[in-house]
């Protein structure tokens, strides 16, 4: 019999960031994952405090960023890899009206810190940007694929990872612990992303899921060192490779790439990219999106040792450290969960 404080189901951003809190607080745990979901592995990994369609602040952006960046730094030190790439995001303007809206937004108290009031002109022949760009500050990219790969290796090395599907019917809640096969734990955290739909304890929650596809292009003549946001994002990965994405699809709930997704991305890309390029890769995943666009955090109404950490939606990089901390403080320190994120709202 193996005794631990926690079992975590899922090693995507939600599961990993919760595990990071446990490590910092000297709690023992086991992580179980079967790689059935891909969202965190394929994610663009951007963190950006501004919604660039409407020029408005992302929900609790400042608070989340201040909490998240030191956590990723801790993970970099622990895993001895680079994860956080500070890189500016430039929003391409399509009209004078968009430039004006940007100026108005950059003057708002919640946004001045994040939006540069200056418009930069384009001097890159590979890009069509007649109205220039606006720059967002305090942005960057977390290499989520690297994070997940190295974190799993770290856990395997410590005998804390099980590469298997979680069997919900093998879980028993006793009066003073949880029993799962030969593991005895004080609590269990379900962080399965869209896999939550198979979880009999929490599948009633309104997680609708939004499929996203990305392509990688090789474009030697592009030479940009910032993230470009137009109708799609263009994210530099080094070696003349760029990630282009993403699509939003609500009916197909598979992790399979499609020709339709690729065509949509290429069509949008060609509206502003003028140089030659080749598509070298394509990936897909399901974002765990929720009807009211807020995370799903909390305790099962009857089984008091069961918890959920989900609903990171389109912004897992910024939200995961924030909700992981909230859930830990709720379980270990009896801190109240905000109504906004607590599953009791459903
Ligand atoms: C194309 C795309 C681009 C994105 N770009 C960005 C971006 O630039 N910035 C950003 O912040 N966010 C981005 N996101 C969103 C981000 O990926 C998600 O918010 C986040 O990854 C969700 O993490 P999660 O851990 O909740 O879920 P997941 O990543 O889905 O992880 C869940 C894990 O649970 C495991 N699992 C599920 N069921 C079981 C089971 N029964 N047994 C064992 N294991 C199980 C799965 O295998 C998986 O590893 C993007 C998403 C997509 C799809």
Image (cartoon, rainbow, N blue to C red):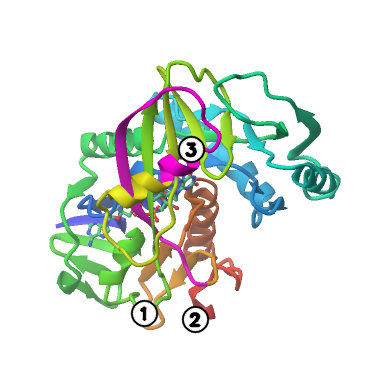
Label 3, label 2: how far apart the Cα atoms are? 39 Å
Residue underneath mark 2? 346
- Do the numbered discs 2 and 1 sit on residues whose CB atoms are within 8 Å? yes
Tell whether 39 sits left or right of 257.
right
Q: N-terminal of the two: label 1 or label 3? A: 1
Image coordinates for residue 83, horizontal then vertical, percent: 45, 30
The answer as to whether callout 2 falls within 8 Å of ligand 1 is no
Establish if 245 lies above or below 76.
Answer: below
- The residues colored magenta run 265-291
Circle 1 SS class: loop
Q: Nearer the viewer, residue 43 or 301?
A: 43
Establish if 81 lies above or below 283.
Answer: above
Disc 1 crowd, CA 10 A, few/some/many (<14, 14-19, 20+) = few
Residue underneath mark 3? 269
Q: Is residue 23 magenta?
A: no
- In the rendered structure, find residue 204 and report the number of the disc placed on it: 1
Q: N-terminal of the two: label 2 or label 1? A: 1
User: In which quadrant of the rendered view does residue 303 lie?
Assistant: bottom left
Tell whether 192 sits left or right of 141.
left
């Amino acid at each position: 019999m193996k005794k631990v404080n926690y079992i975590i189901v899922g090693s995507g951003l939600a599961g990993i960031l919760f595990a990071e809190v446990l490590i910092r607080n000297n709690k023992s745990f086991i992580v179980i994952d079967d790689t059935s979901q891909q969202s965190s592995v394929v994610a663009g990994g951007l963190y950006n405090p501004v919604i660039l369609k409407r020029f408005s602040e992302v929900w609790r952006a400042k608070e989340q960023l201040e909490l998240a960046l030191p956590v990723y730094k801790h993970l970099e030190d622990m895993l001895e890899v680079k994860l956080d790439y500070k890189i500016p995001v430039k929003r391409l303007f399509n009209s004078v009206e968009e430039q004006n809206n940007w100026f108005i937004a950059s003057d708002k108290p919640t946004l001045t810190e994040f939006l540069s009031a200056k418009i930069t002109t384009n001097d890159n022949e590979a890009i069509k940007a007649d109205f220039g760009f606006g720059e967002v500050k305090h942005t960057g990219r977390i290499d989520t694929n690297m994070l997940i790969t190295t974190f799993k290796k770290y856990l395997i090395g410590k005998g804390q990872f099980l590469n298997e599907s979680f069997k919900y019917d093998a879980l028993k809640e006793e009066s003073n612990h949880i029993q799962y096969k030969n593991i005895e734990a004080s609590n269990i955290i379900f962080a399965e992303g869209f896999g939550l739909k198979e979880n009999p304890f929490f599948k009633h929650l309104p997680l609708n899921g939004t499929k996203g596809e990305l392509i990688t292009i090789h474009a030697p003549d592009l030479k940009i060192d910032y993230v470009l946001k137009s109708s799609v994002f263009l994210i530099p990965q080094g070696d003349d490779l760029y990630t282009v994405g993403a699509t939003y699809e609500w009916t197909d709930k598979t992790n399979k790439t499609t020709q339709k997704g690729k065509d949509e991305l290429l069509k949008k890309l060609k509206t502003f990219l003028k140089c030659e390029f080749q598509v070298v890769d394509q990936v897909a995943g399901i974002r765990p999106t929720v009807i009211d666009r807020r995370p799903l955090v909390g305790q099962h109404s009857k089984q008091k040792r069961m918890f959920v950490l989900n609903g990171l939606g389109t912004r897992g990089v910024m939200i995961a450290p924030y909700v992981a901390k909230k859930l830990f403080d709720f379980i270990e320190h009896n801190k109240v969960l905000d109504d906004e994120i607590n599953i009791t709202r459903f």
